[in-house]
């Protein structure tokens, strides 16, 4: 065996036979036709030739234009509909659309679940993002957002007094602040992890009677900082709040290095 043949064998390729050309070609990975249909329409949307709200051709017309059968066109459109790039506005006709950030973040959260992220993975990320979000929001937040936060804190206090779960209210509080930053990229970066980490604190809240009140106290201090446009105060208390999550996990003797579950993700979907 020549050195060249040995190298080919190490790569799992067969040795060349006598008379074969020196070039080695692998089989092409050809995408299913329905994916090519979806990618073709996606390119039209992403490059602006199809704008949000524009009506797409019918399945029959699309199949004729692309030279595929109708069932292939239908599968391509179904794939696009699942991604949120097209939607049915009325009847059966599809229109180009812009996926909502909640829809995108829910999918990203599910991807994180499949990656088996742990509480500590999420905590490390949100220790960076949430305090910074509070500081940025203090400079950009509008009165409407402050009223929503005030209402949220009051409802959270009432839920604590009744001994009810505050998980969804906690997630709502952080979502309002994240949105108040006014940066779509920031929103998409933090929301998938937040969708998983804050509901993952529910077992800790149940195990530590003092935890819900500490949460409310932190939220009240963060809100006070936002009202005064005091970025340092809002950031400091958000940092304390996120640190408190981890400390609570430790006190409750919960496993931080085990994959988180989807607690709260489905209920959040139902709220949309």
Image (cartoon, rainbow, N blue to C red):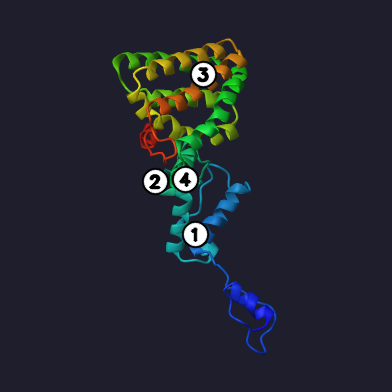
What is the secondary structure assignment of the residue under circle 2? loop
Q: Earlier in the sequence, mark 2 or mark 3?
A: 2
Residue tagged by mark 2? Answer: 91
Mark 2 or mark 4, which is nearer the start of the sequence? Answer: 2
Circle 1 residue: 61
In the picture, measured across the screen, residue 177 lies left or right of residue 24, that is left
Spot occupied by residue 153 in the image (x, y as percentages of width and height): 43, 15
Q: Earlier in the sequence, mark 1 or mark 4?
A: 1
**Image quadrant in which you'd find residue 209:** top left
Residue 66: x percent and y percent? 54, 63
Q: Which residue is mark 4?
A: 111
Q: Position of residue 91 (x, y in %)?
A: 39, 46
Total of numbered circles in the picture? Answer: 4
Residue drawn 54% across the image and 29% down it: 127
Q: Nearer the viewer, mark 3 or mark 4?
A: 4
Q: Nearer the viewer, residue 250 or 14?
A: 250
* Lower position in the chain sequence, tag 3 or tag 1: 1
Q: Is residue 243 above or below residue 37?
A: above
- Please give the residue where the numbered disc 3 appears in the rendered image: 145
Q: In this view of the protein, which residue sits in the foreground, 134 or 187?
A: 134
């Amino acid at each position: 065996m020549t050195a060249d043949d040995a190298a080919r064998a190490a790569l799992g390729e067969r040795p060349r036979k006598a008379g074969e050309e020196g070039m080695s070609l692998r089989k092409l990975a050809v995408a299913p036709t329905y994916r090519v249909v979806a990618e073709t329409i996606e390119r039209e949307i992403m490059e602006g030739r199809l704008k949000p709200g524009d009506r797409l051709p019918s399945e029959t017309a699309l199949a004729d234009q692309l030279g595929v059968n109708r069932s292939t066109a239908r599968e391509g459109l179904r794939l696009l509909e699942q991604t949120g790039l097209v939607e049915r506005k009325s009847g059966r006709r599809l229109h180009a659309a812009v996926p909502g950030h909640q829809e995108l973040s829910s999918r990203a959260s599910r991807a994180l679940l499949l990656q088996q992220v742990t509480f500590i993975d999420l905590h490390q990320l949100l220790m960076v993002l949430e305090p910074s979000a509070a500081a940025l929001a203090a400079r950009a937040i509008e009165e409407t957002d402050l009223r929503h936060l005030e209402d949220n804190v009051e409802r959270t206090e009432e839920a604590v007094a009744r001994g009810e779960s505050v998980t969804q209210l906690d997630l709502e509080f952080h979502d309002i602040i994240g949105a108040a930053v006014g940066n779509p990229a920031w929103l998409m970066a933090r929301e998938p992890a937040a969708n998983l980490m804050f509901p993952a604190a529910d077992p800790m809240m149940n195990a530590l009677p003092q935890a819900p009140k500490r949460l409310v106290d932190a939220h009240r201090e963060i809100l006070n900082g936002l009202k005064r446009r005091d970025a340092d105060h809002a950031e400091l208390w958000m940092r304390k709040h996120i640190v408190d999550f981890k400390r609570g996990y430790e006190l409750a003797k919960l496993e931080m290095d085990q994959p988180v579950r989807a607690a709260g993700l489905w209920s959040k979907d139902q709220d949309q």
